[in-house]
């Protein structure tokens, strides 16, 4: 029981990170109907930017960890958002009228570019960062097993909830959100009623990338290591989360993320740690076959 | 697409400089931390960083100059060379392609004779033909049927491991194992395809990617069967229809009264894979003329229309999938026998991406294009060997650039084998229009 609760806590933390990445997939898919294959690598770039920004901040004499983390959060969000914007501008926008699979192929190319760019620029070795946030609480003990909730887990979950709330507000209540929803329903019609479609799509990518940057920072704090390849698996799992929750749906992305985090943690805890990534891929396949609209998604209407 | 009215306008220097300044600013933001600062593990294990502002300044300056030049002269270049869209398909071009294909094939046949003494070039030749064959196989799935398969390497792996394991446990020879490996790979294709082929294009892509990774993870972790990360060593080499390539008196050299040379086997392997590749090519070309091939092409052009006309889309996709998988399996068995050693390392997503890039570059659906793309790409990798850390980077950039500027392939086009009415000049814009405006 204690063991289970502990895995529950770990799973929710991990799932929050996946959820943050999944939002990027789900939003882009909702609006332009493409899988932004490079999004996992945007997350990886975000993690690297956070790492480097932190080292620079420390070298510049910022000694308080919370302040440094706050600066790092802002810097990495801003710069990762710039990456998201650039990727959309270079690799996806020219293809909006092209054949069906073109954006996906371009996205795969972009994913290869980002991975190898970071590998060339920063080396292939893993980058360790000593734990910055210490401490935590022991919730309860029993059977020689103490259930712990660490401060970093609290930070991850609270940040995720705050961002989710903020972002849902943006989508539901602001002009930008209204434009986004309009583009999602019908891009041509949205353009006719005076919405700047290009700008809305750009902003979608910018927001998705900024959220991925937060996920990158959380990943860095939680695991303490990054390398240029983390984006691939994290990306696939987050995509699975988006599909599981119902692609195009924001709460779906979050729920899907947490479910995937839980499944992965439980699988490693009770079955086998070697096959945990197989579990993620397996779930993706099973969900797509039996529940292609996901938990909260709408069935897709095929238009000629 | 160039806007006609603006073509004759003189270059606008202030506007170009402004655009370049913005691009340079964006580039600075992108590269300031990742290029400007390099992190490495210091002597104590903690990360230390060094600055590389010189490289950063150079890149930003390069972006500035490139953007300014593009803004000033791009329209003129477009004007001078006509459209950046693909060259229209002409009959003369088609005949030229036939000659090119014949010349290419002739050269491929002569490679072992011309370069007999050069082991390095022969090995490169084998590599190029192997990837050409993989490209042909994937071309059936992606180019003909229009199904994006990101896990093609899975079938390659199934073929390689099938041969290695059958040879190891049952002692069967390469020539018996080859069809078995193909069959097993085709079976794997059907196994995967059956449940997932109802999915729409991009979902299918992700599922195949997942399948590729699952196969790799299983190979890594099923230690008792596959040897896990250590792979399978000592895979038997192929024999010349029973005559082994060794110095013994029953060997190939002794039987034909030749002096024994290890090159014999390399040449033999080269011709084996060339035959397999040509077989794949021939089967593809013939299949394209069968109803199933027509159905594949129709499916690629418009799935909804296909279904309306009574084509069983699931079965059609499944055959394409199985066919592509089978040829992947053949190539895998060949790979295993050539290497003599296989491990899951050889079957990563990068491999799938490489084959996919060959197909995309070659102009999805074109056989000659695939062969040229494989030659250019793998030859290029070898030429720029010392820059090997940049090669995947360049290759990713090429993939994006090709899809944007030459969406129907660098080398060739992929017109349907039959169509009603005149074939139209196809560019990215026309494809978009065709999808929305002309009835299928």
Image (cartoon, coloured by chain):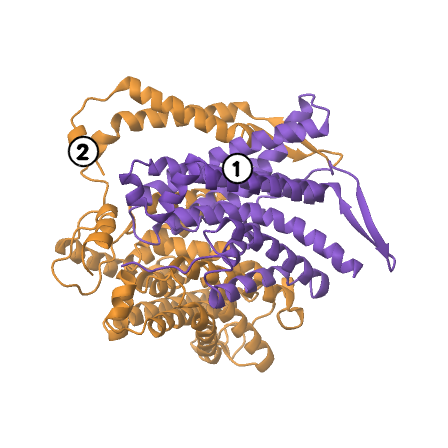
Chain colours: A purple, B orange
Viewer-proximal residue among B226 and B187: B187
Secondary element type, mark 1: helix
Circles 1 and 2 in contact, beta carbons < 8 Å: no
Label 2 secondary element = helix
| Image location of residue B256, percent across then percent down | 42, 76
A143 relative position to A178: left or right: right
Query: Which quarter of the rendering shows the N terminus of chain B?
Result: top left
- Residue A210's label in the rendered image is 1
**Left or right: B109 in relation to B353:** left
Name the subunit of mark 2. B
Q: Is residue B242 visible?
A: no
Q: Residue at x 79, y 49 (%)?
A: A148
Q: Nearer the viewer, residue B112 or A61?
A: A61
Residue B4 lies left or right of residue B291; in this view the side is left
Q: Is residue A262 above or below residue A209?
A: below
What separation in Å lies between label 1 and label 2 (alpha carbons)? 40 Å
Seen at 56% across and 45% down, the residue is: A20
Q: Mark number for residue A149? A: none
Q: Say if residue B273 shows up in the picture.
A: yes
Instruction: Give the farthest residue toward the right.
Output: A144
Residue under numbered circle 2: B79
Report the residue that reaches farthest toward the left.
B421
């Amino acid at each position: 029981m204690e063991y289970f609760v502990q895995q529950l806590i770990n799973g929710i933390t991990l799932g929050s990170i996946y959820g943050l990445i999944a939002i990027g997939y789900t939003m882009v898919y909702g609006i332009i109907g493409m899988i932004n294959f490079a999004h996992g690598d945007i997350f990886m770039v975000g993690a690297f930017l956070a790492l480097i920004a932190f080292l620079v901040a420390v070298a510049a004499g910022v000694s308080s960890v919370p302040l440094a983390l706050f600066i790092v959060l802002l810097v990495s969000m801003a710069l990762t958002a710039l990456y998201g914007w650039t990727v959309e501008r270079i690799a996806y926008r020219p293809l909006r009228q092209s054949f069906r699979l073109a954006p996906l192929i371009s996205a795969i190319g972009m994913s290869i570019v980002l991975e190898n760019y970071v590998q060339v620029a920063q080396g292939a070795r893993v980058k360790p960062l000593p734990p910055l946030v210490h401490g935590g609480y022991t919730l309860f003990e029993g059977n020689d097993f103490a259930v712990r909730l660490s401060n970093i887990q609290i930070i991850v979950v609270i940040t995720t909830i705050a961002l989710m709330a903020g972002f849902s507000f943006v989508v539901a209540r602001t002009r930008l959100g209204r434009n986004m929803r309009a583009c999602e329903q019908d891009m041509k019609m949205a353009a006719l009623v005076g919405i700047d479609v290009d700008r809305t799509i750009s902003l979608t990518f910018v927001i998705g990338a900024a959220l991925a940057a937060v996920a990158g920072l959380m990943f860095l704090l939680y695991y303490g290591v990054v390398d240029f390849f983390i984006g691939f698996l994290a990306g696939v799992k987050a995509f699975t989360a988006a599909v599981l929750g119902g692609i195009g749906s924001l709460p779906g992305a979050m729920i899907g993320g947490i479910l995937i985090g839980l499944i992965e943690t439980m699988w490693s805890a009770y079955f086998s740690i070697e096959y945990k990534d197989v579990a993620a891929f397996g779930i993706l396949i099973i969900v797509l076959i039996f529940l292609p609209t996901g938990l909260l998604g709408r069935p897709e209407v095929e238009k000629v | 697409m160039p806007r006609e009215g603006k073509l004759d306008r003189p270059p606008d220097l202030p506007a170009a400089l402004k655009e370049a300044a913005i691009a340079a600013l964006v580039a600075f933001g992108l590269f300031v931390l990742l290029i400007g600062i390099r992190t490495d593990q210091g002597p104590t294990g903690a990360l230390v960083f060094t600055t590389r502002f010189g490289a950063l300044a150079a890149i930003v300056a390069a972006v500035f100059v490139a953007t300014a030049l593009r803004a000033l002269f791009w329209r003129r270049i477009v004007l001078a060379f006509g459209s950046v869209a693909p060259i229209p398909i002409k009959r003369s071009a088609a005949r030229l392609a036939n000659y090119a294909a014949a010349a290419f094939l002739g050269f491929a046949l002569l490679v072992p004779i011309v370069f007999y003494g050069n082991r390095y070039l022969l090995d490169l030749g084998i590599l190029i033909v192997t990837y050409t064959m993989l490209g042909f196989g994937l071309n059936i799935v992606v180019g003909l049927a229009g199904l994006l398969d990101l896990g093609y390497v899975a079938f390659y792996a199934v073929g390689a491991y099938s041969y290695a394991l059958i040879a190891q446990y049952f002692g069967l020879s390469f020539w018996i194992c080859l069809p078995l490996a193909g069959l097993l790979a085709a079976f794997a294709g059907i196994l995967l395809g059956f449940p997932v082929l109802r999915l729409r294009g991009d979902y299918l892509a992700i599922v195949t990617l997942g399948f590729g990774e699952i196969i790799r993870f299983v190979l890594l972790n099923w230690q008792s069967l596959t040897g896990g990360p250590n792979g399978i060593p000592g895979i038997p080499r192929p024999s010349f229809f029973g005559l082994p390539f060794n110095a013994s008196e029953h060997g190939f050299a002794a039987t034909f009264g030749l002096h024994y040379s290890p090159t014999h086997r390399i040449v033999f392997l080269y011709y084996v894979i060339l035959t397999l590749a040509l077989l794949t090519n021939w089967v593809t070309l013939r299949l394209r003329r069968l109803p199933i091939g027509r159905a594949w092409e129709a499916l690629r052009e418009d799935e909804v229309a296909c279904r309306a006309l009574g084509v069983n889309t699931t079965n059609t996709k499944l055959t394409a999938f199985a066919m592509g998988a089978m040829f992947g399996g053949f190539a895998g068995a060949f790979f295993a026998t050539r290497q003599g050693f296989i491990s899951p390392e050889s079957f990563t997503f990068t491999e799938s991406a490489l084959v996919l890039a060959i197909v995309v570059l070659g102009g999805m659906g074109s056989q000659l294009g695939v062969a040229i793309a494989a030659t250019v790409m793998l030859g290029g990798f070898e030429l720029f060997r010392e820059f090997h850390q940049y090669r995947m980077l360049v290759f990713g950039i090429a993939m994006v650039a090709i899809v944007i500027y030459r969406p129907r392939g660098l080398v060739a086009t992929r017109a349907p084998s039959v169509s009603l009415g005149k074939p139209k000049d196809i560019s990215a814009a026309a494809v978009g229009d065709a999808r929305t405006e002309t009835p299928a």
